[in-house]
Image: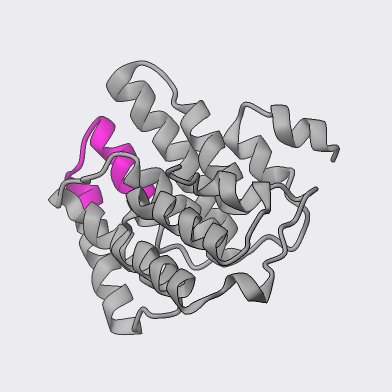
Amino acid sequence: MLEAEWLTATDPTSLLALLPAPVSNRKCRLLACACVRQEWPVPTEFGCQLAVNAGEKMADGQLADAERHAAITTIEAGATEAANAWSYLVTAAGACLHPIGIDSADIALDSMDGYCMELFNRSDHIVRVALVRDIFGNPFRPVSVNPSWLSSTVVAIAAGVYQDRAFDRLPVLADALQDAGCDNEDVLNHCPPTG
């Protein structure tokens, strides 16, 4: 793969296929969850929201087996009731719980495409390509974090953003990173500063 391919790909599934092995199961599962979250707030019907929340916990190794089985049972019941565009969304949400991360991402990407085509008669490939690039970064320019940037303030803000899914706070994180001495454009562009 060439960096030009990574930067110009317009199909999220082919972009995912360009990633060098081994591909992170955690990041693949988070991609599946992010695909469904683009429709947030996902209605609680059919167990979609439960499956996405459980998938995110699963990605972080914080999902108990009983909780996973309960979410699977709920989403499977929802799948038998969902019709039309909803069936695609339910499939994408269910993919968040797939045991294999790369399959989780592939199924979610494909299902969200079907959902958008069924509901809006269009694809949102651009949005999902951006999600892949955002979650996996540029494999040709891996970012190394300087330990001096990890001040207690930066760590606390980053943990809060992630835990609360409050991505609107990313500019605050960027400001804190700059205060800690970060001047890496890739890091700062990921969470643009406010000033």
Q: Which of the two residues, 9 or 47, is positioned nearer the viewer here? A: 9
When the figure is inspected, residue 122 is found, relative to residue 103, above or below; the finding is above
Is residue 62 rendered to the left or right of residue 155? Answer: left
Q: Quadrant of the C terminus?
A: top left
Residue 121 belongs to the span the image colors magenta: no
Residue 87 belongs to the span the image colors magenta: yes
One can see residue 17 in this view: yes
Chain part drawn in magenta? 78-92
Q: Position of residue 178 (x, y in %)?
A: 56, 57
Q: Position of residue 104 (x, y in %)?
A: 50, 55
Q: Residue at x 21, y 45 (%)?
A: 41
Q: Which of the two residues, 11 or 38, is positioned nearer the viewer here? A: 38
Q: Position of residue 107 (x, y in %)?
A: 49, 47
Is residue 189 rendered to the left or right of residue 7? Answer: left
Numbered marks: total: 0
Q: Position of residue 137 (x, y in %)?
A: 65, 50
Image quadrant where residue 180 sits? bottom right
Could you tell me what secondary structure mostly forms the magenta stretch? Answer: helix
When the figure is inspected, residue 31 is found, relative to residue 181, above or below; the finding is above
